[in-house]
Image (cartoon, rainbow, N blue to C red):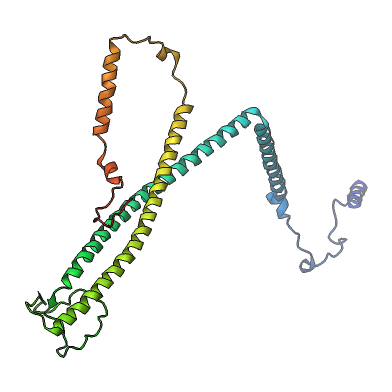
Amino acid sequence: MSTEEASAQEHRSERGDVVSPSTEAPSQPAASRPRPRLNLGALTGAGTERKRGKSMFGIVLGTLNKAKVEDKERNASEAAKKRQLIEQRLQIKLRKETDSVRRAEEAKKEKTLANRKEEDLQLKDSIYKLRRRRLPLLANFLLTSDVIPPDGSPPPPSANPLAPVPRSHPPPLYYLPAVLTPAQEAFMTRRKAEVTEAVKGEWDAFKQEREAGISEINGLRQKVADEEARQKADRDAMDTDAPAPDASTKGAGPSSSSDKPQDAAMDVDDGARASSARPESEKKDESAPMQADDEEAVEY
C-alpha cells in the first residue's frame, strides 16, 4: 500500500465514514434497546381535525348571534310592529269566533234539554191528574182479592193505599154489592179516607216538583234567549263594520216611478212567503201551556 492510500484511509477514518470492524466499539445488546414510539396523532392528523371542529363551532355560534341580532332589528322595525298588530287582531278574532261557536253549541244543548224536560213534565202532569181523578173513584168498589174481617173489627191500615192491584190468576175484579154488609161498608169507608189522603199528598208533592221543573226550564230558555240576542248583536256589529258599497254601485240612478209599485209588491210577496215557510222546528220550540183541568193550570 502506498503512502497516499494510507493517508486517505486515515483521513476517512477520522471523518467516520469508514469504521474498521476491528476498531468498532461493542454496542448494547438488541434486547435492552428501547423500542421507538410512533406518533399516531401526527400520522392521522388529529390536531388538524380538532382545529377544524373549533373553527366550525365558532362559525355556528357566529351565525346564531347574527340571527339574534337580525331578529331584534326586524322586531324593532315598523313593518314588524304592524305584522305583530295584525297577528294580535287575528288571534283575538279567532278567540272570539271559537267562543261564539262554543256558546252556540251550549245554547243548542240547553234548548234541547229544556224541550226534553218540558215533555217529561207534561207527561208526568197527565199521569198524576189521571191518578187524582181515577183512584178515588175506584175506592168506591170492592175487589175480589180484598180481605174483609167478618166480625166487624176495623181492618189493619194499608201500607200503601195507592199501590196497584196485585196480579194473580184469575185476576181480581171490581164489584159493588147491591146491599153492603156493615163490615163491607166500614172497609170501604176506611179505604176511601186513606185513598183520598194519599192522593192529596201525592198531588202536593208533584206540584212542588212541577214548580221546580218550570223554574229550571225558564232558566234554560232565558239562557238560550240571551245567547240568541248576543249573536244577533254580533251580526249587527259585523254588518256595521262592513265596508260601504262603491259609488259605481250607487250611481245607477233613481229607478223609474213605474218600477216602485212592482218592487213594493215583490217585497210584500217575499214577506208573506217567509212567514208561510216558517220551519216547523221553531213552532215546536215555542213553549205552550200544558192542558190542565179547571183548578190546576201549568204556565211556562
Q: Is residue 147 above or below residue 66?
A: below
Where is residue 10 drawn, in percent x and y?
Answer: 91, 51
Position of residue 174 in the picture relative to residue 245 (left or right): left
| Residue 90 seen by the camera | yes
Where is residue 193 drawn, in percent x and y?
Answer: 24, 75
Q: Is residue 125 above or below residue 67?
A: below
Which residue of the protein is positioned furthest toward the bottom in this rendering?
A: 151
- Residue displayed at 25% across by 82% down: 157
Picture quadrant of residue 271:
top left
| Residue 1 seen by the camera | no
Q: Nearer the viewer, residue 286 or 41?
A: 286
- Residue displayed at 28% across by 57% down: 296
- Residue displayed at 42% across by 39% down: 229
Position of residue 145 in the picture relative to residue 77 (left or right): left
Where is residue 85 drawn, in percent x and y?
Answer: 59, 33
Position of residue 241 in the picture relative to residue 115 (left or right): right
Where is residue 150 drawn, in percent x and y?
Answer: 14, 89
Q: Is residue 287 above or below residue 273?
A: below
